[in-house]
Amino acid sequence: MLLLSGIACIAVTGLVADRSGSQSLRTSIFDQLTTLRESKKSDVERYFREIERQFVALSQAPATIDGMVAFTSGYNALQGQEKPPPELMSFCEKDFLPQVANLVEGDLTASSCLPSDPLAIRLQTDYIAHNPYPADDRQKLLSAGTGTSYDIAHQRYHPFLTRAAEASNLSDIMLVDARTGTVVYTIYKGIDFGSNVVEGPLAHSGIGRAVASALRDGTADGSVVLEDFSAYLPSLLAPAAFVAVPVIRDGQVLGILVAEVSKDDIDKVMTSGGRWEQVGLGKTGEAFLVGPDRRMRSGSRFQQESPESYYAALSEVGISNADIERIRRFDSAVLNQPDDSRAADEALAGHSGTDVLEDYRGVDVLASWAPIDVLGTRWAILAKMDVSEALAPVSEFRSRVIQVAAAAAAVLTIVSLLAAGAFTHPIREVLAGVNQLAAGDEETRIPVKGSDEFSELGRAFNSMADEIAARSDKIAQKTDEYEALLRNVFPEIIAERIRIGDESVAEAVKNVAVAVVNIEGLNALISDAARDTLKSINELISDFDEAALAAGVEKIYAFGETYIVACGLSTPRLDGARRILGFVDAVADIADRHGRSWNIPLALKAGIALGDVEVGLVGRQRTVYSMWGVTMLTARRIVFDADANSARVTKAVLEQIPEADAFVEEESVSINPAETVATWQRPIGTTPAATAAT
């Protein structure tokens, strides 16, 4: 009886440990999924806040407002064309309609993709039918060569809007006349170019609803509205979401600035760039978004990793062949993959939760869900992992418990029945302590009494637990100190790459304004034996640093007579050239003030360029943060040809600043034996003394 009691105790211990371990592991997985869900939710909200911030800034930019006026007046001044030319008919009938014919019910005719308005026909003729570039590169056409006021406006503002779309990674930017609802400009020149999105066939499309919402809800304060994903005919019925904001001048709404949101960017946020295992989702976990129509707003991990198995699973759970074919056609689950789970329903109703349920593949998963609101649109965010993977350690633990129980039963059979009672209690305590420690409870300790072998085991366990807790605290402290040091020494983007172990830490950054400033006259300061040279130079450079901070530019380098700054590295800036030029004017005044104070003639020369740069860490023994590239080389080169107290700029800089008329064109500067750049120059400084020195 005592032997059976001992075996029963072991069995009960194993059962309790199994249930406790299963529940603890399930709770731990739910906590992990919830943490990941909240992290992804914050990332998506941050992404749309950044889109909103950049889009509002773009709508208020002088170039955007002037472009809205120029494109609208240019469009209205066009000479209409009553009949589409053969090239435009051919594009519609041979290139466009065959690609969408299988995706819609009924027959499509040429009227589905050809405008009826004579002005729109003229516009599509000039920029689509007669465009020498292929369909995917139509945005490369700067001028149609017609000489119309519209074409002149296109030459002037198309580069600015194209750069703005690239800087914000938007799929397209469109300008819509607020009075007529006509799309008077797009970057990529689709069939929506020249269409009326208020009264025409596109009025009920995503762009039509976005424009209507912006006119209705966004005019009071110029706020951004988001139109959720829907099939968009001009994009060959691919899923498209739009953001829109009014363009306002002096309280009057001139038009609507519309952009197509990149679904690929949302996918990168939700999939961590395909690094599911690295972020703790194992081999079957994923996080995704679901819209009010119970269809996905981000991609499926399984469609990306093993598409054929994914399609087979969808077919088995009854997903329609039409939905599966659309996923294949667009290579995306966005808007095509339904999710009718309870998790999606509760999240869209505003509730958060966790539970075990069946996912869209018909597989049991541990899921965590919550609502997410972006720009007035409610989505559901879900994080999940297959039960088979999440609870796999429970099965392994159960097998080990059975093995231990069998071994203990064999031992109990051999040893005295009287010893069974003495063994049971301390073994249970040790197993409970091990389970708690394995579950992450580093505070657990085993009560120790006496001096027998089990007491020694308990003391050894407690000593081991103390050591683990102390090491965990030390590791956490050192990790925090290391990460804090990285973020103090390097920019955030560089510090993060060092933290994850990248050996080559470098980044390519687009649309960065760079200024190289040379200070002439410091030699006279150095040769003045009566003056504390280092103190004087420190005063001058400190004032330069304060001017950089005030102008919103970043100091890159200061050595000898050279001071280098940039704008647009850490934070994208549409007005980087204007900020750099303001900084150069400010330091010219500072140099003039110090020169007069020291009775030493100081003069500044500045070279300013705009474009792409590369930044990163250079060197192995003494690592420094540096910047290089053609833009940096250009700024370094043109500063040598600048006159004293003047700034030399490139064409890209000149196009971004409103006061371009103040510059005078100078001779082109040779960058290398095979390349020259055109430059312009104007005096720098705002005080009379500084400008008079020129």
Image (spheres, grey):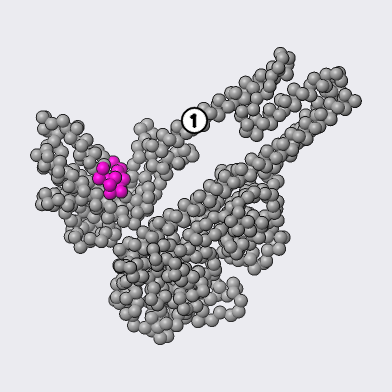
User: What is the residue that sits farthest to the right in this orientation?
Assistant: 1
Judged from this view, the residue extending furthest toward the left is 599
Disc 1 is placed on an element classified as helix
Q: Amino acid at mark 1?
A: Gln
Q: Which residues are magenta?
A: 546-557
Which residue is rendered at x = 47% and y = 33% of the image? Answer: 480
- In the image, 251: left or right of 638? right
Q: Quadrant of residue 313?
A: bottom right
Expressed as whole percent of the image width and height from the top left, the position of residue 606 reads 21, 49
Q: Is residue 60 visible?
A: yes
Q: Nearer the viewer, residue 536 or 35?
A: 35
Q: Which residue is outermost to the top?
A: 451
Query: 529 left or right of 218?
Result: left
Residue 163 magenta-highlighted: no
Can residue 550 be found in the magenta stretch? yes
Q: Position of residue 651 (x, y in %)?
A: 26, 59
Question: Which quarter of the figure has residue 183?
Answer: bottom left
Q: Residue at x 26, y 42 (%)?
A: 545
Circle 1 residues within 10 Å: few <14, some 14–19, many ≥20: few
Q: Position of residue 636 (x, y in %)?
A: 25, 47
The residue lying furthest to the bottom in this view is: 82
Looking at the image, residue 399 sits to the left or right of residue 672; the answer is right
Q: Which residue is mark 1?
A: 477
- Give the residue displayed 88% in from the left and 27% down from the top: 4
Above or below 57: residue 448 = above
Can residue 143 be seen at all in this image of the molecule? no
